[in-house]
Image: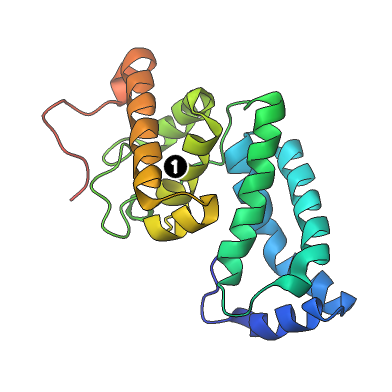
């Protein structure tokens, strides 16, 4: 959900949509819907729930977009709305466990100076299956922080803004998520764990 160089005149699209231009808003939905659904899916663990979250996100976006501050990063703002909606859903019914498959390219997980995450050096296909089960053991905030930082690859500062917490809280959520996932891997999927003395990543 990144504004990579303002693709397709995104800022102009946002400005027009905020001014009540329904066609511009519909175009904005087309541009952002896939990533909103994906993010909601990663947090809720269920595709139908993710679609419901996306629908509520865009309904809310139509109402609040006129209040959007152009000085902010739009994707950070949209992430916040999406993650909050997904977390609210998790709190009412609990996670179902499944997450969007992890990226095929391991370098995505090692981006932005990562210290060698849990996934580094493991078979990603097997890890996807294991992670889909283990993610249900995370709290909603841990799950959201882990998804945004480790899977989406956002900077810690941006995740903190999205979740409205401090950077240290984000780091703690991610650390606790890694520990929970590692413990689950060691217990239920020992073949996926690297040797104790081996560090993942370069």
Q: Quadrant of the N terminus?
A: bottom right
Dot 1 falls on a residue whose secondary structure is: helix
Whole-percent x, y for residue 128 in the image: 46, 34
- In this rendering, the answer to whether 160 lies above or below 44 is below
Label 1: how many residues lie within 10 Å, few (<14), some (14-19) or many (20+)? many
Residue at image point 52% right, 81% down? 5
Q: How many numbered marks, from 0 up?
A: 1
Residue at image point 23% right, 48% down? 115
Task: Please give left or right for residue 176 compared with residue 86 in the image.
Answer: left
- In this rendering, the answer to whether 6 lies above or below 35 is below
What colour scheme does the image use? rainbow
Task: Please give left or right for residue 14 compared with residue 104 in the image.
Answer: right
Farthest residue, direction left: 197
Whole-percent x, y for residue 191 in the image: 30, 20
Task: Please give left or right for residue 140 compared with residue 41 in the image.
Answer: left
Task: Please give left or right for residue 77 compared with residue 188 in the image.
Answer: right
Residue at image point 47% right, 36% down? 142
Whole-percent x, y for residue 25 in the image: 81, 73
Whether residue 198 is visible to the viewer of this picture, yes or no, is yes
- In this rendering, the answer to whether 21 lies above or below 143 is below
Q: Which residue is mark 1?
A: 146
Whether residue 46 is visible to the viewer of this picture, yes or no, is no
**What is the quadrant of residue 146 in the picture?**
top left
- In this rendering, the answer to whether 102 lies above or below 27 is above
Residue nearest the viewer, comparing 28 with 76 = 76
Residue at image point 64% right, 76% down? 69
Farthest residue, direction top: 187
């Amino acid at each position: 959900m990144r504004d990579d160089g303002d693709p397709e005149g995104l800022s102009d699209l946002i400005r027009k949509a905020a001014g009540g231009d329904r066609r511009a808003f519909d175009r904005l939905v087309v541009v952002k819907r896939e990533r909103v659904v994906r993010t909601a899916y990663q947090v809720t663990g269920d595709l139908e729930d993710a679609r419901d979250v996306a629908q509520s996100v865009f309904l809310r976006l139509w109402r609040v977009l006129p209040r959007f501050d152009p000085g902010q990063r739009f994707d950070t703002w949209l992430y916040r709305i999406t993650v909050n909606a997904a977390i609210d859903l998790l709190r009412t019914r609990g996670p179902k466990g499944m997450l969007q498959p992890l990226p095929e390219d391991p370098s995505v997980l090692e981006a932005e100076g990562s210290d060698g995450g849990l996934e580094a050096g493991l078979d990603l296909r097997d890890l996807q299956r294991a992670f889909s089960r283990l993610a249900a053991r995370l709290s909603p905030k841990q799950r959201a922080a882990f998804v945004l930082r480790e899977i989406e690859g956002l900077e810690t500062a941006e995740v903190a803004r999205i979740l409205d917490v401090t950077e240290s809280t984000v780091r703690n959520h991610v650390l606790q998520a890694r520990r929970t996932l590692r413990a689950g891997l060691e217990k239920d999927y020992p073949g996926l764990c690297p040797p104790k003395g081996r560090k993942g990543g370069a």
